[in-house]
Amino acid sequence: MTDNDASMNDDTLQAIMGRLDRLRSVPDSALAEVVAENCSCLDIRLSDDPPLWLSELISDRELAARLCAGCPVQDHCLELELRMSGERTVGVWGALDESTRRLVYAYWDRTRRNQARAASSDESRPDGEH
């Protein structure tokens, strides 16, 4: 575990989950469309010129910070990547590098499974019982 990974404490993970929870019921196709239409990194891919950062020696964390700075769909991008790639995530998505995202994925997966169990339990109870 790196120093940066150690800084990914429960409060940070809970804050990320709080942002992602609002996207929980959005279909994958809708998330993909929103990300494709609004992501900041798409501007880089559409240019004929190679990105300036290709010639620089920077870490994935630095690249994520640069590419995703101010991107309006960071959370959508992260939610989509967690759903689609899970712990096999690679590269920069949602302003996080892959090692950080793997930590987030473990927490995200556990939280979503717990939420699904709770919802399933609530649905199996007779009306009015809590």
Image (tube, rainbow, N blue to C red):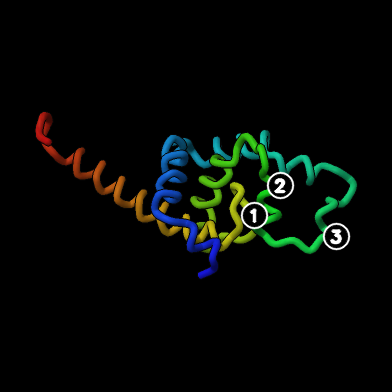
Q: Is 43 situated left or right of 76 in this image?
A: right
The answer to whether marks 2 and 1 mark residues whose Cβ atoms lie closer than 8 Å is yes
The residue nearer to you, when weighing 57 against 32, is: 57
Q: If you read the primary sequence from the N terminus, does the residue marked by circle 3 or circle 2 appear first?
A: 3
Q: Residue at x 71, y 39 (%)?
A: 40
The secondary element bearing badge 2 is classed as helix
Q: Residue at x 26, y 41 (%)?
A: 119
User: Residue 117, image x and y in percent?
Assistant: 26, 48
Q: Is residue 111 above or below residue 31?
A: below
The residue nearer to you, when weighing 19 against 116, is: 19
The secondary element bearing badge 1 is classed as loop
Choose top left, top right, bottom left or bottom right for residue 68: top right
Instruction: Tell me the number on the disc at residue 55.
Output: 3
Disc 3 crowd, CA 10 A, few/some/many (<14, 14-19, 20+) = few
Q: Amino acid at mark 1?
A: Val
Q: CA distance from mark 2 to mark 1?
A: 9 Å
Disc 1 crowd, CA 10 A, few/some/many (<14, 14-19, 20+) = many
Residue named by callout 1: 92
User: Residue 27, image x and y in percent?
Assistant: 48, 38
Q: CA distance from mark 3 to mark 2?
A: 15 Å
User: Residue 4, image x and y in percent?
Assistant: 55, 61
